[in-house]
């Protein structure tokens, strides 16, 4: 079996899914400490004139709290902004009308814990990709020896070019002459639909043996 451990991201980028493609079991760590410079509460989409970062606002900036203790700041109208941005960027995409309702429902449902929201969104993405990945949650017991631990690898503070997971393979996007690489998986799903899995396969960087 191919089993890995990853961080839980908000609407993860394509690099994340090139790592996850072909995996049988994904290990997640609810008790890991929250790190400010991470993809836990941010992602990127393509708009008409730029790549836009979508960030989920969180309450406070308390250090040394677990991921499940991170609370969404519901006082801010972030859901409306995110949904409006997604609709603006992808409303005319070929598969938007098929896939958007899944994400709209999840984002519109009241949720205080960012971990729970991210988990639901990841589950939706796996469903739309038709990937039967088993999700396993790890506490203090540690990882089995055969699990590859890739936590802390995919960070916004560095570029995918420095890592061994993802190589951009262009597909038709709605805006711009130049291909915008490694956006949220939303970009791929809305633009490519049922061909998303095949393109992610081509985007897996071949590692030297």
Image (tube, helix red, strand yellow):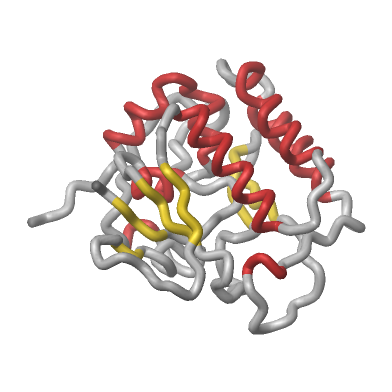
Tell whether 10 sits left or right of 143: right
Which residue is depicted at the point 43% across and 61% down? 154
Which residue is depicted at the point 59% across and 39% down? 46
Of 195 and 6, nearer the camera is 6
Tell whether 68 sits left or right of 196: right
Q: Is 120 drawn above or below residue 164 in the view shown?
A: above
Residue found at the very far front of the displayed protein: 141
Q: Is residue 33 visible?
A: yes
Quadrant of res 122: top right
Q: Is 90 drawn above or below residue 51 in the view shown?
A: above
The quadrant in which the C terminus is found is bottom left
The image position of residue 150, as x and y in percent, is 36, 63
Tell whether 138 sits left or right of 83: left
Which residue is depicted at the point 51% across and 27% down? 128
Residue found at the very far left of the displayed protein: 209
Tell whether 154 sits left or right of 44: left
Quadrant of res 149: bottom left
Quadrant of res 153: bottom left
Q: Is 36 drawn above or below residue 203 in the view shown?
A: below
The image position of residue 191, as x and y in percent, is 51, 24
Of 2 and 209, nearer the camera is 2
Residue found at the very far bottom of the displayed protein: 63
> How many badges with numbers are in the image?
0
The image position of residue 52, as x and y in percent, is 64, 47
Q: Is residue 51 visible?
A: no
Which residue is depicted at the point 34% across and 49% down? 19
The image position of residue 189, as x and y in percent, is 51, 29
């Amino acid at each position: 079996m191919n089993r890995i451990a990853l961080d839980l991201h908000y609407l993860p980028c394509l690099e994340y899914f090139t790592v996850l493609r072909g995996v049988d079991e994904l290990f997640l760590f609810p008790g890991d400490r929250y790190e400010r410079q991470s993809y836990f509460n941010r992602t990127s989409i393509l708009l008409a004139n730029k790549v836009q970062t979508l960030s989920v606002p969180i309450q406070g900036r308390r250090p040394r709290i677990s991921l499940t203790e991170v609370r969404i700041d519901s006082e801010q109208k972030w859901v409306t902004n995110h949904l409006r941005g997604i609709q603006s960027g992808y409303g005319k995409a070929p598969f938007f009308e098929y896939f958007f309702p899944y994400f709209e429902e999840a984002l519109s449902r009241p949720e205080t814990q960012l971990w729970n929201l991210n988990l639901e969104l990841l589950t939706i993405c796996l469903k739309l990709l038709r990937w039967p990945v088993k999700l396993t949650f790890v506490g203090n017991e540690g990882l089995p020896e055969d699990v590859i631990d890739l936590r802390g690898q995919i960070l916004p503070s560095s570029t995918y070019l420095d890592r061994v997971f993802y190589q951009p393979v262009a597909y038709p996007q709605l805006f711009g002459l130049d291909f915008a690489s490694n956006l949220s998986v939303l970009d791929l799903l809305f633009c490519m639909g049922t061909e998303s899995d095949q393109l992610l396969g081509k985007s897996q960087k071949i590692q030297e043996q």
